[in-house]
Image (cartoon, rainbow, N blue to C red):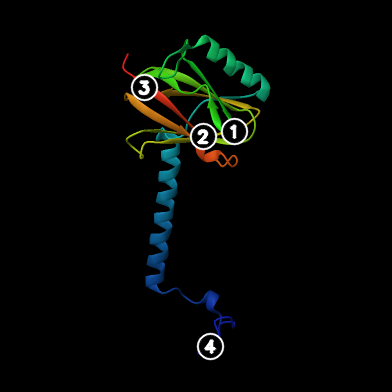
Amino acid sequence: MSDPLDDPDDDWWNSPINRRESVWLGLVGAWSLGIFTWMAGFTQFGDQNPIGTTYDVDPDRYQERVGEYKEAAEETEDGLIPPNDDVYIGAMRFNWDGLPAVLEVGREYDIHLGAYDVQHGFSVRPEENLNKQINLQVFPGSEWVIPMTFDEAGTYHVICNEFCGQGHRTMHGRFTVVEE
């Protein structure tokens, strides 16, 4: 048996390919092209990528805007009821400023996300279904405005899914979505 690291004996590069190898290479090439096309189409037409606008903002100024929002919102036992369609959420170690919030089913809200200190993850999922989930990144110096509509009433948990320090595991918030 020869060493696999030794050069092959003849001019293997110019040898004809076995028919089975050509069929296999054709199938692999077609499959790869199909998967690539499917992924590109799903990204473009599958409504999977969150849309929204980002703005450069000073973290201290963003924190002031969240404070103004909290003052204008109605405070209830279940959380803040936004005064309009804008919901301001600030991420900071180890808390979500502006949460909990009470939102209405079917109403589109502009969720404003920003961080005061370090990078955080913004993960929203319904309480009873782990399969429906959205994950976003929140950066200091950036405000991301994302339109969101909740189709079902219930409790939606918000967690930080980007390690932000020793208290990371305690960083929880919630949306309570109610019928109109």
Asked whether residue 161 is in view, the answer is: no
3D distance between C-alphas at marks 4 and 2: 59 Å
At a point 43% along the width and 58% down the height, the residue shown is: 29
Asked whether residue 140 is in view, the answer is: yes
According to the picture, the residue beneath numbered tag 2 turns out to be: 171
According to the picture, the residue beneath numbered tag 1 turns out to be: 93
- Asked whether 107 or 45 is in front, the reply is 107
In this rendering, the label closer to the viewer, 4 or 1 = 1
Q: What residue type is disc 4 on?
A: Ser
Return the x and y of residue 128 as percentages of the image width and height: 32, 35
Q: What residue type is disc 1 on?
A: Arg
Q: What residue type is disc 3 on?
A: Val
- Check if mark 1's residue and mark 2's residue have beta carbons within 8 Å: yes
The mark that comes first in sequence, 3 or 1, is: 1
Considering the image in quadrants, where does the C terminus appear?
top left
According to the picture, the residue beneath numbered tag 3 turns out to be: 177
